[in-house]
Image: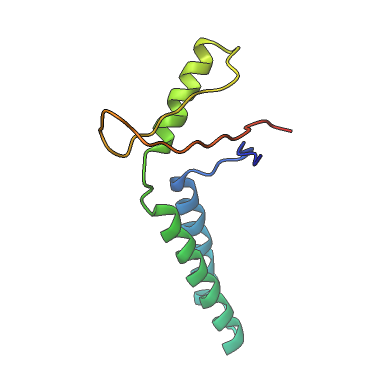
Amino acid sequence: MRKLYKTEEFPVCEIQKLVNDVNSHINHIKNNYSYDAKSSELLNWISEKLNSISKIARREVRFDYLFIQSEIDKLYKKDNTLTGVVLILNFKKLKSHNRGFLEFNLTKN
């Protein structure tokens, strides 16, 4: 079974800040130092890739996973003996549902 436990988290605002910092440094280098065409090409390529990362980080997700994570954290704070959480996501409001089943281990090891 695939393990989904994340050991490190980078919020979108932090990713954006880091991209902006690196782009700022690249612009400083380009403006204050003389480089050959190949070096300038490389710096432009790096800047483009960083901007792509920034766009991906800002992309809207399909559902509010941070809200779900926060609710799970609240449940665990109330009862730290919990060994799991049942999460049901309904795409449509119906009396009878046809649901798929996914199970993941979120263990640290």
Q: Residue 3 in the image: x percent, y percent?
A: 65, 39
Q: Residue 69 in the image: x percent, y percent?
A: 47, 30
Q: Nearer the viewer, residue 42 or 61?
A: 61
Q: Residue furthest bottom?
A: 37
Q: Residue 31 in the image: x percent, y percent?
A: 49, 76
Instruction: Examine the rendered structure and indicate whether residue 100 appears above or below residue 77.
Output: below
Instruction: Examine the rendered structure and indicate whether residue 91 appears above or below residue 52.
Output: above
The residue positioned 48% from the left and 72% from the top of the image is 48
Q: Is residue 31 in view from this perspective?
A: yes
Instruction: Examine the rendered structure and indicate whether residue 47 appears above or below residue 74.
Output: below
Instruction: Examine the rendered structure and indicate whether residue 56 appears above or below residue 45.
Output: above
The residue positioned 58% from the left and 79% from the top of the image is 42
Q: Nearer the viewer, residue 2 or 98?
A: 98
The residue positioned 46% from the left and 65% from the top of the image is 52
Q: Residue 24 in the image: x percent, y percent?
A: 48, 63
Q: Nearer the viewer, residue 71 or 3?
A: 3
The answer to which quarter of the image holds residue 33 is bottom right
Q: Could you tell me which quadrant the C terminus lies in?
A: top right
Colour basis: rainbow
Q: Nearer the viewer, residue 9 or 29?
A: 9
Q: Is residue 36 in view from this perspective?
A: no
Q: Could you tell me which quadrant the N terminus lies in?
A: top right
The residue positioned 59% from the left and 84% from the top of the image is 35
